[in-house]
Image (cartoon, rainbow, N blue to C red):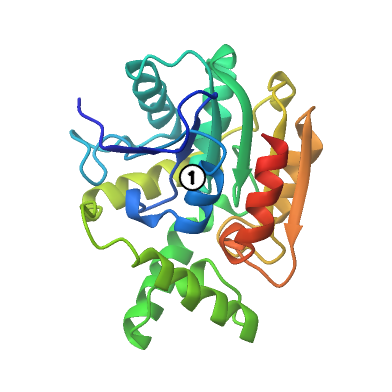
Amino acid sequence: MEFAYRELGPGADVPVVFLTHLAAVLDNWDPRVVDGIAAKHRVITFDNRGVGASSRSTPKTIEAMARDAITFIRALGLDQVDLFGFSMGGMIAQVIAQEEPQLVRKMIIAGTGPAGGEGIDKVTRISYLDTARGLLTRQDPKQFLFFTRTANGRRAGKEFLARLGERTNDRDKAISIGSFRAQLKAIHRWGLQKPADLTRIHQPILVANGESDRMVPTSNSFDLDRRLPNSRLVIYPDAGHGGVFQFHEDFVKQALEFL
């Protein structure tokens, strides 16, 4: 198994491993968030199995994705990391913290929810609807999925998508349709699962989201904060699923203080 990854920032500290969202490859991380956190910490971003330039086929459960992430972290010879999981990545981070607690020092989870969380089983329908909307209006579906339809949200979406295009060399391979479908299946299963006992996750956790998340309803962020014993919550106004990208300056400041 081969994992594609990128690494930047100073080498000495506990590294921050980024766990990606649905359909994302290495180039889908907001450069302002990556560079902002890498200004003070070693940052490692990677493609999970079967995604982008990583080999093999994509798992159909969040638990299998978490095991792959653990394999990747161990393959780099790391025995402790911080995790930043966005959306599907936040689901993966929860499983890693439960299965390998000694591996995780601190966690940031954004735009995500717990197993069995409200509305997570609807992600497939919303993703397909907004992909169709994107095709009809010739816009990137993330404009609808990640951002509100207010003037601020539309502007923030355009700015975010422009930032994603800043890297021109050594770009990653796009996700395949088969991998995208496998990820949707995994998220759907996560949404139908019995709730996990989150009191077993004792690491300090920063939970963040926009106040109007359509993909993973914001109520899930409040639920996580209530059920995790050592968490704090940041909710951004007039923002959706991509709130941490819309408010990247504040989010990076909060993340650096937390780490």
Image position of 43 (left or right of 248): left
Q: How many marks?
A: 1
Across and down, in percent, residue 215 comes to 55, 60
- Visible residue check, residue 150: no
Image position of 252 (left or right of 134): right
Across and down, in percent, residue 23 comes to 35, 53
Q: Nearer the viewer, residue 167 or 198?
A: 167
Residue 187 versus residue 126 in the image, above or below: above
How busy is the neighbourhood of tag 1: few (under 14 within 10 Å), some, or many (20 plus)?
Answer: many
- Secondary structure at badge 1 equals helix
Residue 32 versus residue 49 in the image, above or below: below
Q: Residue at x 50, y 23 (%)?
A: 12
Q: Residue at x 75, y 23 (%)?
A: 199
Q: Quadrant of the C terminus?
A: top right
Image position of 147 (left or right of 209): left
Q: Residue at x 53, y 44 (%)?
A: 39
Q: Nearer the viewer, residue 107 or 13?
A: 13
Q: Amino acid at mark 1?
A: Met
Quarter residue 82 falls in: top right
Image position of 124 (left or right of 227): left
Which residue in the structure is indicated by mark 1? 88
Q: Quadrant of the N terminus?
A: top left
Residue 204 versus residue 32 in the image, above or below: above
Across and down, in percent, residue 146 comes to 53, 66
Across and down, in percent, residue 149 comes to 59, 81
Q: Nearer the viewer, residue 130 or 239?
A: 239
- Visible residue check, residue 28: yes
